[in-house]
Amino acid sequence: MTSTFPNISISTERLVLRPLDEDDVSALAEMMNDEQVAAWTHVPQPFTEDGARTWITDHAPTEREAGRGLDLAVTEFLTQRLVGIVQLTKTNWYIRATELSYIIAPWARGEGYASEAALATAQWLFTDQKFERIELRTAADNTASQQVAQKIGCISEGVLRNACIARVRTEDDTWADVRTDFIVWSLLPEDIEGSGEQLTDSDGFTSYGDWN
């Protein structure tokens, strides 16, 4: 029997992580059309509102129900504005491991939201879901993503040479694929012992039905 992630909300001091819903369509499409998102992800460009709606109503529920992963909207607690997303993919329920990635909207960068959301997700995975390993992969030149990995306690395990496809703008204002390296990071429960205690002590993990 395939294991699946629950519909979950995770609260931090400044953020609420929750399932994506159709009210996020416009903000998600705008965020995914950012230059940095286009450069470091495989998101189709341009990214339309129809694409965002399909992601929210079809892709995300299918991935969760199949046990492969989880897509969470990252929102500001006070304004409920969408600041980014956290994704879990390539989940292996036997070894209790998953791959984590994050995207933050351009206007919200520099506020520490990526590390706060990633750490909260890791705490939930290790405490509530009893996971034993989280893996992150960052493109060799994506220093912002690498800084997030370091900030939450990840350990660099090595380089996958020539394993990443990034994108660059061409002279005719289109996108072209370029090959680069992946840096592989891991996070284990003992790497963040003591981190986020306030989150778990304050009942920061609730079912989405209860929160909603």
Image (cartoon, grey):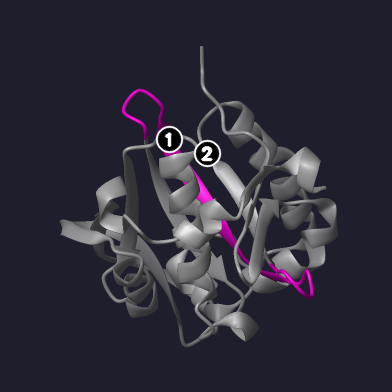
Q: CA distance from mark 1 to mark 2?
A: 6 Å
Q: Position of residue 62 (x, y in %)?
A: 65, 32
Q: Position of residue 194 (x, y in %)?
A: 35, 59
- Left or right? Give the position of 9 relative to 70: right
Q: Residue furthest top?
A: 1
Q: Position of residue 6 (x, y in %)?
A: 63, 34
- Left or right? Give the position of 47 relative to 175: right
- Left or right? Give the position of 79 relative to 35: right
User: Please, what is the three-letter code of the amino acid marked with disc 2?
Assistant: Gly
Q: Residue furthest front?
A: 201
Q: Residues within 10 Å of mark 2 (few under 14, many from 20)?
A: many
Any part of residue 206 in sight: yes
Q: Which residues are magenta?
A: 76-96
Q: Position of residue 169 (x, y in %)?
A: 47, 81
User: Please, what is the three-letter code of the amino acid marked with disc 1?
Assistant: Thr
Q: Residues within 10 Å of mark 1 (few under 14, many from 20)?
A: many
169 or 2, which is in the foreground? 2
**SS of the residue under disc 1:** strand
Label of residue 69 in the image: 2
User: What residue appears at the point 76 percent right and 69 percent down from the top-left corner?
Assistant: 27
User: What residue appears at the point 80 percent right and 67 percent down from the top-left corner?
Assistant: 26
Figure check: 83 above or below 74 = below
Which of the 4 image quarters holds residue 51? Answer: bottom right
User: What residue appears at the point 68 percent right and 36 percent down from the top-left corner?
Assistant: 61
Residue 184 on the magenta span? no
Figure check: 100 above or below 2 = below
Label of residue 91 in the image: 1
- Left or right? Give the position of 195 relative to 205: left
176 or 71, which is in the foreground? 71
Q: Are marks 1 and 2 in contact (CB under 8 Å)?
A: yes
